[in-house]
Image (tube, grey):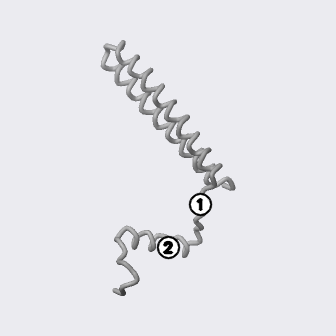
Amino acid sequence: MTEDKPMKSSFELAMERLRKSDADAGIESRPLTDAQKAAIAEVRNFYEAKIAEQQVLHQSRLSTAADPAQRATLEEDYRRDRERFASEREAKIEKIRNPRT
């Protein structure tokens, strides 16, 4: 290798290949604006708070439930709520990143 160009890490090489394949597929990469970054951070903070609130409520409900079937139902509801919050969060973030879609 030449003296003026240091060796690239495997990560750098992989990222170059991904950028090239994206360019070949017509996918353009645009950096996020400061407003988009702030909006994404706000969405993430909101959903982190919602998930934390659900977790506290879930723990409270579990502490009063003695029946295993009821506990299983509570666990399933909690899992479903977390998945719904995560899905909503990702959809809103994607809409911020790509407002045209």
Mark 1 lies on residue: 31
Q: Which mark is residue 76?
A: none
Q: Residue, x 58% and y 47% (percent of image)?
A: 93
* Quadrant showing the N terminus: bottom left
Mark 1 and mark 2 residues within 8 Å of each other at the beta carbon:
no
Please name which of the two marks, 1 or 2, marks the residue nearer to the observer: 1
Image: 48 above or below 99: above
Q: Residue at the location (60% across, 63% down)?
A: 30
Q: CA distance from mark 1 to mark 2?
A: 18 Å
The amino acid on which the numbered mark 1 sits, given as a three-letter code, is Pro
Residue placed furthest toward the front? 4
Tell me if residue 12 comes above or below residue 76 in the rendering: below
* Amino acid at pointer 2: Ser
Residue 83 position, x and y percent, is 46, 37
| Helix, strand or loop at mark 1 | loop
Residue 62 versus residue 49 in the image, above or below: above
The mark found on residue 21 in the picture is 2
Picture coordinates of residue 80 (x, y %)?
A: 45, 33
Where is residue 60 shown, x and y percent of the image? 40, 17
* Quadrant in the picture for residue 101: bottom right
Q: Residue at x 43, y 22 (%)?
A: 56
How many C-alpha atoms fall within 10 Å of the one at disc 1: few (<14), some, or many (≥20)? few
Q: Residue furthest bottom?
A: 2
